[in-house]
Amino acid sequence: MNPSEPSQIQSPVLLIGAGGMLGRAWRGLLSRSRVAYDAPPVADFDLKRPATLAPASSGPWRTVINCAAWTDVDGAESREGEARALNADGVGALAQACRRSGATLVHYSTDYVFDGSAREPIPVDAPRRPLGAYGRTKASGEEAIESSGCRGVIVRTSWLYAPWGKNFVLTMRGLLRTRPLVRVVNDQRGRPTSAEHLALASAALLAQEAEGLWHLTDGGECSWFEFAREIAALTPGACPLEPCTTREFPRPAPRPGYSVLDISDAERLLGPMPHWTDNLAGVIAQLPDPAPASR
Ligand SMILES: NC(=O)c1ccc[n+]([C@@H]2O[C@H](COP(=O)([O-])OP(=O)(O)OC[C@H]3O[C@@H](n4cnc5c(N)ncnc54)[C@H](OP(=O)(O)O)[C@@H]3O)[C@@H](O)[C@H]2O)c1
């Protein structure tokens, strides 16, 4: 990927969801690049309470980056209304506020807007066909931005991880050092994505004045089992791993079997995305040395 120019982002920036996994990556990037930004806590800027969103339309913000979302995929199955209030209605209200102020809205969406039946990387303009509640609410959020008339960039991504937050890499590191054996599904394929790299690549998109829908992930593809195998290779004292099927590991929300997003539009503009194994090694290198394995 070509070096990005975060300092070219139109500032000041309003960063929403700054305490989350991706929000924290954006916060680090904006701070390092000395871009002026504000990151209000949820109590002051709550996407479920439209009355608190006034600063987005009346403030000085030239760019609004929304990293906030209901991300509990399984929980959304039984609480779709709450997930929708944030991922669809709140996002729609935010897009309206940006239309009024003229700020550019940067918003994140997901591979879960697709049903997983594809057999090759899913193009940006493929029809939305979510399998579960989380995907339905995220698809509605995309539609709300598209119909709002705001200047918006919607970035779909997948399998996000970082040196912080709740994610597969950190969970797997813990399991690999405390369990005698870990079984991981091998029949779902996708693209892991480093949150720090995603923030950097998003900044590069903004520097190119991109608009509309984009797919941004790390390069390459793998199954969850292959992802776990690479994590294990970088984790001293890791226990053995065994592949299993989705059927053997039932969850409340259905998972798409094939989630590889086609990132060729972004790569034409920004250059090739780093392979997921390279980004993974960079993230694991940032983690503190693990305590001795206990099992
Ligand atoms: N994680 C993934 O694997 C993945 C994959 C594909 C796409 N995405 C998308 O990428 C984006 C970032 O995901 P993430 O994993 O970084 O999310 P995350 O870690 O779950 O963080 C979500 C953030 O949203 C905030 N938030 C929750 N309710 C809010 C409300 N009512 N108003 C304002 N803020 C609220 C949370 O604040 P508190 O912490 O204070 O509650 C938190 O800072 C999301 O749009 C997600 O759908 C994620």
Image (cartoon, rainbow, N blue to C red):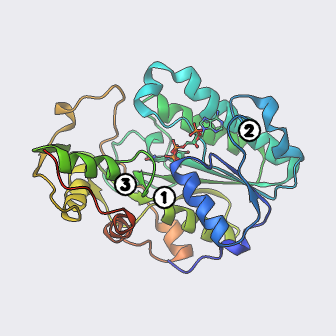
* Residue position for label 2: 45
Please state which of the two labelled residues, at mark 3 or mark 1, is closer to the viewer.
1
Residue lying farthest to the right in this orientation: 58
Q: Position of residue 272 (x, y in %)?
A: 45, 75
Q: Earlier in the sequence, mark 3 or mark 1?
A: 1
Residue lying farthest to the bottom in this orientation: 2
How crowded is the residue under tag 1: few (<14 C-alpha within 10 Å), some, or many (20+)?
A: many
Task: Tell me the distance, in whole angstroms, between the alpha carbons under discs 2 and 1.
Answer: 23 Å
Q: Is residue 48 visible?
A: yes
Question: Who's the residue at 75% across and 35% down the image?
Answer: 93
**Residue type (three-letter) at the residue carrying disc 2:** Phe
Q: How many marks?
A: 3
Left or right of 76 on screen, residue 180 = left
Which one is nearer the viewer's eye here, 108 or 242? 242
Please state which of the two labelled residues, at mark 2 or mark 1, is closer to the viewer.
2
Question: Who's the residue at 77% across and 64% down the image?
Answer: 36
Q: Position of residue 91 (x, y in %)?
A: 68, 38
Q: Position of residue 182 (x, y in %)?
A: 15, 44
Look at the image and tell me in which quarter the C terminus lies. Answer: top left
**Residue 114: quarter of image:** top left
Q: Is mark 2 within 8 Å of ligand 1?
A: yes
**Residue type (three-letter) at the residue carrying disc 1:** Ala
**Residue type (three-letter) at the residue carrying disc 3:** Val
* Residue position for label 3: 260
Task: Tell me the distance, in whole angstroms, between the alpha carbons under discs 2 and 3.
Answer: 33 Å
Ligand 1 position by quadrant: top right
Q: Position of residue 190 (x, y in %)?
A: 33, 53
Task: Tell me the distance, in whole angstroms, between the alpha carbons under discs 3 and 1.
Answer: 17 Å
* Residue position for label 1: 195
How crowded is the residue under tag 2: few (<14 C-alpha within 10 Å), some, or many (20+)?
A: some
Question: Who's the residue at 60% across and 76% down the image?
Answer: 4
* Above-or-below relation of 45 to 153: above
